[in-house]
Image (cartoon, grey):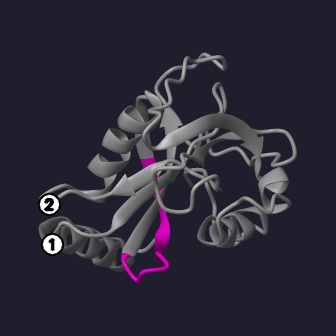
Amino acid sequence: MSEANENGENKREEQTAKQGRGGAVAIVPRPPFSTKRGEPFDFSRVEFLIVRRSAKVAAPGALCFPGGGIEPGEEPREAVVREFLEEVGLDVEVGRFLGERQTPTGAPLFWFAADARSADPNVELRPQPEEVAAVEWRTLPSLLADADFLANNREIVRKIVDGEIALGED
């Protein structure tokens, strides 16, 4: 990523944080896999953390990656860490910025790659029942074939699987 492009993304993230709007989402591989190793992922066998949304939130029953709203004064990367702890009880380290999309309501949605701080493939997850009905580890191709997978998540996963967006660090 060029320095100019990275600076533009940082300014956009800062602007969103000041406004306290938008959301942040991360794609996290199941440990011991990591986005930091720079190795290509075999998407047919590496699993990623997915949540099934509770009946009490928008798009109930849908599958999506964990994430949520950015609070006033919060950076999108901070929102990812907070949302993962709140929604599934997983401590993550946010890595590569994957891009910005829009939610169905037009709010900015910042996408990141992240890694679980635990190297245990059976790390305990604690779904928060108000927002999360269930947690799963799934391969990206299986998600693309699942009718319950949210459309705005499907778009970025397709680009990752097709090699247009890299999850790993350069």
Residue found at the far bottom of this picture? 106
- Splitting the image into 4 quarters, where does residue 32 fall? top right
Point 14% across, 60% down: residue: 72
Label 1 secondary element: helix
Q: Quadrant of residue 14?
A: bottom left
**Do labels 2 and 1 touch, CB within 8 Å?**
yes
Where is 165 relative to 113, above or below? below
User: Closest to the observer: 4 or 146?
Assistant: 146
Question: Where does the image place residue 12, in percent across and percent down from the top left?
Answer: 27, 76
Residue type marked 2: Pro
Q: Residue at image x 25%, y 69%?
A: 21
The span picked out in magenta is 95-107
120 horizontally vs 114: left or right: right
Q: Which amino acid, mark 1? A: Gln
The disc placed on residue 72 is 2
Of the 4 image quadrants, the one containing the C terminus is bottom right
Residue 40 screen position, x and y as percent: 74, 49
Q: Quick one: SS at disc 2?
A: loop
Q: What residue does disc 1 label?
A: 19
Of callouts 2 and 1, the N-terminal one? 1
Mark 2, Cα crowd under 10 Å, few <14 / some 14-19 / many 20+, is few
